[in-house]
Amino acid sequence: MTNVIADTKPTGNSYIEPVSIDPTNFERFLSEAGAVSVHEGVYLRVGEYSRPFGWIIDLSVVITEVMRLLEIVVPMLIKQNITFKIPKDRDTAKSLLDGYLSYQSVGKIISIFAASEGDAEELISFLLTRTEQFRGPRVPTDMHIGGIVHCRFGAYCPVRRMVNSGEIEDGVFTSANQFVPDPTTIPFSLPRGVQWPFKSIPLKQKLSEKRILNGNLKPTSILKSDSRGNVWKSLHLKSLLHLKPCVIKHGRVNTCSDEHGRDIKDRLLWQKKIQEDLTGKVAVPKIISYFEQDGDSFLAMEYVKGNSLADLSSAITSNTRSWLDLNRDEKLLLLEYCLKLAQLLEKMHSSGYIHRDV
């Protein structure tokens, strides 16, 4: 790469040729921008990989800003003959952002494969300035440099093979035909034997997991693991002698964004409002607190011990018997559950809310 900043630093966006982007097919956008692309999984790749391993720059952005980011960054990458990948269409980008394809791929909307460490450092500095108006979720495999810019050391074009244990492993074959595993980890850490090469960019050390959240909440176990944020069973530390079980819902910054610019933070705040409105009308867990920490959102509520409707139903039917196979008492018990559910829904509806997932 030759002097990226000097060659492409614009006044406004005058250096970008306006290209319409078809949301159902980014291949046409690349073609009109003068690039030849090839399909690589759910991505379109432009350019050839210069080496098997190296530093990869990942740009993450919320779904409403994907098109704009492509318009700003892609022409510069094409002009400088830099190898990169983008999702094949907007729906794929949404799936990547929401973690539906894999937790490892969350946020990887533009992946850039620099030919050298020097090129990568120059690109990072340029992109930090050029993309500062955007926001996006954190990329779990990468070190967060700043804004939407992330970086990791990994295989440029990993292959998959099955190891003796039957598990799938990603890696590359060296010139000596030796398979080397991809060193990508979650959270980001420097692979053994790899040094941080960027003198102008400080290496952020791995942050230790916080044992106490918001000064009085201690997570004890994960009830649900999710790319948007985990759900923890926790302890509410009211005092040294007063501990009470609770549940904490975690929302990772800028995840689950929709067409209206709302994200996981808005969802948690909406859940807080609904549960507070329904308190005393419908049996809902009491809200303890909503708070934000390191950009993430958290909603703490009381822990209600009990069984789910699915578990209660399974205990009766054993998941193998139909309604016609049940005896009279079993049918009456299931009907009692249905009646209670209908009564709860009636109370919710009369309070001005409609449950959309029943």
Image: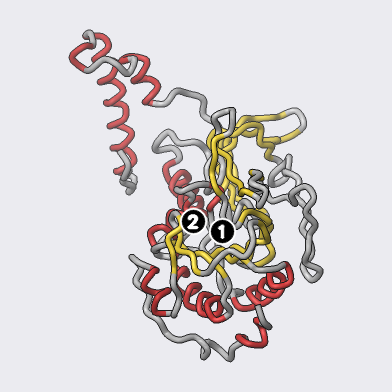
Q: Residue at x 31, y 26 (%)?
A: 340
Query: Which x, y percent locates residue 355?
Result: 32, 43
Quarter occupied by residue 341: top left
The residue type indicated by label 2 comes to: Leu
Left or right, residue 324 beside residue 53 = left
Query: Which x, y percent locates residue 335?
Result: 25, 20
| Residue 137, disc | 1
Give the SS element for disc 2.
Answer: helix
Quarter occupied by residue 153: bottom right
| Residue 90, disc | none
Q: Nearer the viewer, residue 223 or 175?
A: 175
- Image vertical order of residue 313 relative to residue 293, above or below: above
Q: Are marks 1 and 2 in contact (CB under 8 Å)?
A: yes
Q: CA distance from mark 1 to mark 2?
A: 7 Å
Location of mark 2 (residue): 97
Q: Residue at x 39, y 74 (%)?
A: 29
Counting labels gives: 2
Task: Give the mark nearer the N terminus: 1 vs 2.
Answer: 2
Query: Which x, y percent locates residue 186?
Result: 65, 46
Left or right, residue 158 beside residue 119 = left
The answer to whether residue 54 is seen in the rendering is yes
* Residue that lies at the very extreme toward the front in this rendered image: 176
Left or right, residue 358 beside residue 26 = left
- Image vertical order of residue 34 relative to residue 100, above or below: below
- Image vertical order of residue 160 relative to residue 316, above or below: below
Q: Residue at x 33, y 65 (%)?
A: 24
Quarter occupied by residue 21: bottom left
Give the SS element for disc 1.
Answer: loop
The answer to whether residue 186 is seen in the rendering is no
Q: Residue at x 60, y 56 (%)?
A: 139
